[in-house]
């Protein structure tokens, strides 16, 4: 008997986007390690190139393994379509490539992943895409920064690295009034902990490099579209609503409706920017999705215990973790991340820059490296690494001052993690 009820999150983690391979019956999604696909005939080829038929042409645009992951992520986020790409930064590039033209602006939180602050503030300048960084804790700041040229508002649901939670519902209201999409980087929360579309977000981006793949093996990114934004409501989004010369004057929004963004991001974004996800990486990320809920539960439980331990440690000045009642973001975390506040957080060591570097070097079980969301526990001193390119003022705003240490808590036995941090903090 077939049930019409939408399957639960855990069922979709494993089954969404994947069927047994029809020719061989292979149960796991195969790695389609090939660049191109045979056309039935010349008419078929022509209709594929005109976007009149769905199908595979060339793997820079679409690939069956990548397509399975795209469908799975759309399902997990509750979105309409997904575009996977080479990295989280490529996903951000695809979003703004679709929305912006030279001289346009967007508003972004001043507490983003350090790499995003550099990409937006420095590299995007080369396209004359201008960013206004604001403190989004007060949505009024966002309202004040709006201009007629503003094309989007960009925040992280749970911000890397400081355990900052964005008030998505309030920000979606500001975006809605302004007629621009709210874009949410949901990397640190994953769709298991936070569902930005439920709170009014229009687009979600991911670095699948982190928790979604989960083992530190595969770079990747994704843009998920809710399918709800009306790109034709104003003349601000010609890339999505105006005639596209490269496709005989087709308007993506008129032709594809709620799939307009996803079609544009493949047919123009991936076609011309070329930041395609490798099939092998899509395969690894599909495997990661299968265990997402289990891993996130353990990540969160371990992180909460480590954060509480550090908060009571003599060598520690402060802990910034939304899972702790002491966090100013604890209330927002309970609303937006009811299953747990993630596993990445920061703490301040007594003794500043030198002490921060020393703790990182003294850890034995924690790996000193620049990633998050691995099964392994990771430690980093942002001021001397990921946030090095920023000014002191930007570092402070991003929660990456000289004494700050960032942890990404893995899935090891939690007592081993506590013991390692304790010896590192008390070593001399
Ligand atoms: C890592 C990260 C990115 C960038 O992703 P890459 O896959 O490294 O390009 C963007 N946002 C957040 C929150 C991240 O943690």
Image (cartoon, rainbow, N blue to C red):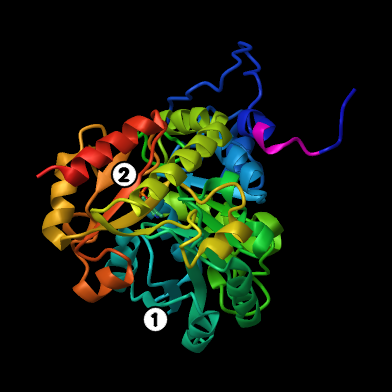
Determine the residue positioned at 61% across, 33% down.
Answer: 13
Give above or below for 275 relative to 294: below
Residue 371 is tagged as 2
Residue 188 drawn at (x, y percent): 46, 50
Residue 130 drawn at (x, y percent): 37, 77
Where, by quadrant of the figure, is residue 302 drawn?
A: top left
Q: From the Cβ of disc 2, is ligand 1 less than 8 Å away?
A: yes
Residue 197 drawn at (x, y percent): 65, 58
Magenta stretch: give its range: 6-10
Front disc: 1 or 2: 2
Name the residue nearer the viewer: 367 or 84: 367
Residue 185 drawn at (x, y percent): 48, 57
Categorize mark 2 by other alpha carbons within 10 Å: few (<14), some (14-19), many (20+).
Answer: some
Which image quarter is the C terminus in?
top left
What separation in Å lies between label 1 and label 2 (alpha carbons)? 33 Å
Res 215 visible: no
- Secondary structure under badge 2? loop
- Image check: 315 left or right of 409? left
Most distant residue in the right direction: 1
Res 255 visible: yes
- Overall secondary structure of the magenta section: loop
- Image check: 106 left or right of 200? left
Residue 103 is tagged as 1
Determine the residue positioned at 87% across, 26% down.
Answer: 2
Name the residue nearer the viewer: 51 or 301: 301
Name the N-terminal-most of marks 1 and 2.
1
Categorize mark 1 by other alpha carbons within 10 Å: few (<14), some (14-19), many (20+).
Answer: few
Is-magenta flag for residue 324? no
């Amino acid at each position: 008997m077939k049930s019409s009820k939408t399957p639960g999150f855990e069922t979709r983690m494993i089954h969404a986007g994947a069927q047994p391979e029809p020719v061989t019956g292979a149960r796991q999604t195969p790695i389609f390690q090939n660049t191109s696909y045979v056309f039935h005939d010349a008419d078929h080829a022509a209709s594929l190139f005109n976007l009149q038929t769905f199908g595979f042409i060339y793997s820079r645009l679409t690939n069956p393994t990548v397509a399975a992951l795209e469908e799975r992520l759309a399902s997990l986020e509750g979105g309409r379509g997904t575009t996977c790409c080479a990295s989280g930064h490529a996903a951000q590039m695809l979003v703004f490539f679709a929305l912006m033209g030279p001289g346009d602006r967007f508003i972004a939180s001043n507490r983003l992943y350090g790499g995003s602050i550099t990409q937006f503030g420095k590299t995007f300048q080369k396209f004359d895409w201008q960013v206004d960084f604001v403190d989004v804790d007060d949505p009024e700041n966002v309202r004040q920064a709006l201009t007629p040229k503003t094309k989007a508002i960009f925040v992280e649901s749970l911000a890397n690295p400081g355990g900052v939670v964005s008030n998505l519902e309030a920000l979606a209201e500001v975006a809605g009034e302004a007629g621009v999409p709210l874009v949410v980087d949901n990397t640190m929360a994953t769709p298991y902990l936070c569902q930005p579309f439920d709170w009014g977000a229009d687009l979600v981006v991911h670095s699948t490099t982190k928790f979604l793949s989960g083992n530190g093996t595969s770079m990747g990114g994704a843009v998920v579209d809710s399918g709800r934004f009306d790109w034709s409501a104003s003349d601000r989004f010609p890339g999505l609503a105006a005639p596209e010369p490269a496709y005989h004057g087709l308007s993506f929004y008129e032709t594809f409706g709620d799939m307009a963004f996803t079609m544009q991001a493949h047919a123009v974004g991936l076609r011309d920017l070329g930041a395609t996800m490798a099939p092998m990486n899509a395969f690894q990320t599909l495997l990661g999705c299968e265990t997402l809920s289990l891993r996130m539960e353990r990540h969160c439980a371990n992180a909460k215990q480590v954060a509480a331990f550090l908060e009571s440690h003599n060598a520690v000045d402060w802990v910034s973790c939304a899972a702790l009642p002491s966090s100013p973001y604890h209330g927002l975390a309970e609303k937006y991340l009811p299953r747990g506040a993630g596993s990445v957080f920061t703490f301040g060591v007594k003794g500043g820059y030198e002490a921060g570097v020393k703790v990182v070097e003294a850890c034995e079980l924690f790996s000193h490296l620049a990633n998050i969301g691995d099964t392994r526990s990771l430690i980093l001193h942002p001021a001397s690494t990921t946030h090095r390119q920023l000014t002191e003022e930007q570092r402070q705003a991003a929660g990456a001052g000289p004494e700050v240490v960032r942890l990404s808590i893995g899935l090891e036995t939690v007592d081993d993690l506590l013991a390692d941090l304790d010896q590192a903090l008390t070593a001399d």
